[in-house]
């Protein structure tokens, strides 16, 4: 997400960072570039105008022009104002009610509403430790109820059955009543979507809202529709008392205009963003962290949270103990590392949160993909246990067999063995006294593209 905005803004602000003196002309030129970058990212025009005016007012003040590091001061102003536009801080779900806390989901057809219900159910179970029940009041799309039933099973949430010949309002009321009897903490009601905003749709969802009085009414919107997403959100907000927005398909949105427009136009916070198709691909929306990514500073906080939550601590401790005892890092350990990366959303998701990624050439970024990780794992799986533990025995005929078994080429096997050898050296350095510090100095603070990392 935000690729085009990151490239344009990152390049413009990078020129300023090191400057010891900034003039009004510098500021005007910079703001012209920033304005173009925002418009190209499909940010709504009123948002761009107000943002530029606010940055200009602060940039022309004494704090920037007379600062000892005026370039960095101006970058901070841009950073602060972007955060303000998107909502300052993450606003979490309000679940402080007599159980069950009722969440009503609204949105257009195709925005990923039903999938977002499942993602939210999983998030509530895993992060908030809540019992969750889901129900579908979408009686117009034949497969909607069955889709939610399948997803509920996948995320281990209770499913309240409904039929296409039932009244949507009655389905919602019955689901909430049943959840109360079952002592469920949270019930999420999925509603019907349409291809566009229409009177019938709004009347129905208003009736459902009045019948169940939800504590949270979330609008699900496709980020790839740009400023149209903000306009649609406004139409729903005018009809319903929305409490927040879930921005979907952000992994396919290179512009990011919706994220920058929604809060300003609706006055409602973006609470979550969908970052992939899997039911685990839902992240709380932190404006400050998102802005940090846009300006090429990464999102180390989210990366650390991902590691703490998804990394298998037992496996990590096991590997550390093995290395301490002088036992070598082998291909089975290498495969475990690849799997851990997969659990954390893949290498692309990790790199997106690392500082300095905007400085890496696009061609190098394109080589970093999860298909490559899957290929490496397939090659290792085609080896015998002995080969994984003693890679040095893998020669000509063995390489040919491994390549055939994994559906790859011999040069792919050679590449993996070369990358593994580099990783092995890194692990050896880490186990030596002061090894980690030496290794980081050797990297010079740069990511070892094509080096020790497995891609």
Image (cartoon, rainbow, N blue to C red):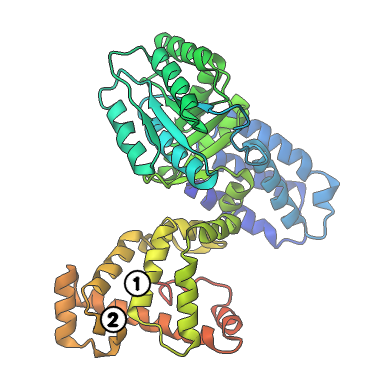
Element at label 2: helix
Residue 11 is situated, as x and y percent measured from the top left of the image, at 57, 55
Crowd tier of the residue under label 2, counting other residues whose Cα lies within 10 Å: few below 14, some 14–19, many 20 or above: many
Q: In the image, is 197 to the left or to the right of 58?
A: left
Q: Nearer the viewer, residue 55 or 142?
A: 142
Residue 267 is situated, as x and y percent measured from the top left of the image, at 63, 26
Q: Nearer the viewer, residue 176 or 280?
A: 176
* The C terminus, quarter of image: bottom left
Crowd tier of the residue under label 1, counting other residues whose Cα lies within 10 Å: few below 14, some 14–19, many 20 or above: some
Which residue corresponds to mark 1? 335
Residue 140 is situated, as x and y percent measured from the top left of the image, at 30, 18
Q: In the image, is 337 to the left or to the right of 19?
A: left
Identify the residue at horizontal 32%, vertical 18% (top origin). Answer: 139
Identify the residue at horizontal 50%, vertical 31% (top origin). Answer: 183
Which residue corresponds to mark 2? 388
Identify the residue at horizontal 28%, vertical 81% (top origin). Answer: 388
Identify the residue at horizontal 56%, vertical 54% (top origin). Answer: 302
Element at label 1: helix
Residue 263 is situated, as x and y percent measured from the top left of the image, at 60, 31
Q: CA distance from mark 1 to mark 2?
A: 9 Å
Task: Give residue 416's quadrant in the image.
Answer: bottom left
Q: Is residue 104 at all visible to an observer of this figure?
A: no
Check the image and report above or below for 318 versus 67: below
Mark 1–mark 2 CB contact (< 8 Å): yes
Check the image and report above or below for 128 versus 268: below
Question: Which of marks 2 and 1 precedes in the sequence?
Answer: 1
């Amino acid at each position: 997400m935000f690729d085009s905005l990151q490239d344009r803004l990152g390049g413009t602000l990078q020129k300023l960072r090191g400057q010891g003196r900034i003039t009004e002309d510098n500021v005007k030129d910079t703001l012209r570039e920033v304005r173009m970058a925002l418009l190209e990212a499909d940010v709504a025009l009123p948002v761009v105008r107000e943002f530029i005016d606010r940055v200009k007012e602060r940039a022309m003040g004494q704090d920037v022009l007379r600062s000892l590091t005026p370039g960095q001061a101006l970058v901070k102003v841009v950073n602060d104002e972007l955060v303000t536009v998107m909502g300052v801080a993450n606003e979490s779900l309000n679940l402080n009610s007599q159980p069950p806390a009722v969440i009503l989901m609204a949105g257009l057809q195709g925005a990923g509403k039903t999938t977002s219900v499942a993602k939210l159910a999983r998030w509530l179970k895993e992060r908030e430790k809540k019992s969750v029940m889901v129900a579908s009041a979408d009686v117009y799309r034949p497969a909607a109820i069955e889709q939610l039933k399948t997803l509920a099973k996948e995320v281990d949430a209770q499913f309240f059955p409904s039929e296409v010949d039932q009244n949507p309002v009655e389905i919602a009321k019955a689901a909430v009543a049943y959840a109360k009897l079952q002592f469920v903490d949270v019930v999420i009601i999925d509603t019907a979507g349409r291809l566009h905003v229409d009177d019938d749709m709004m009347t129905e969802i208003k009736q459902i809202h009045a019948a169940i009085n939800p504590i949270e009414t979330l609008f699900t919107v496709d980020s790839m529709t740009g400023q149209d997403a903000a306009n649609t959100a406004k139409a729903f907000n005018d009809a319903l008392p929305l409490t927040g927005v879930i921005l979907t398909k952000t992994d396919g949105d290179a512009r990011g205009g919706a994220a920058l427009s929604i809060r300003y136009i609706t006055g409602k916070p973006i609470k979550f963003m969908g970052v992939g198709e899997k039911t685990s691909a839902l992240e709380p929306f932190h404006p400050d962290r998102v802005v940090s990514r846009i300006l090429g500073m990464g999102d180390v906080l989210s990366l650390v949270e991902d590691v703490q939550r998804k990394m298998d601590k037992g496996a990590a401790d096991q590997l550390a103990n093995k290395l301490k005892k002088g036992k070598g890092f082998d291909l089975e350990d290498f495969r475990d590392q690849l799997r851990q990366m997969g659990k954390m959303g893949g290498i692309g998701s990790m790199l997106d949160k690392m500082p300095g990624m905007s400085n890496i050439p696009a061609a190098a970024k394109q080589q970093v993909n999860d298909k490559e990780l899957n290929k490496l794992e397939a090659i290792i799986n085609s080896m015998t246990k002995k080969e994984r533990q003693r890679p040095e025995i893998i020669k000509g005929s063995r390489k040919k067999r491994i390549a055939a078994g994994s559906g790859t080429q011999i040069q792919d096997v050679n590449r993996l063995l070369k990358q593994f050898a580099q990783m092995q050296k890194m692990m050896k350095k880490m186990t030596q006294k002061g090894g980690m510090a030496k290794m980081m100095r050797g990297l010079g603070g740069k990511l070892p593209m094509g080096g020790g990392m497995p891609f």
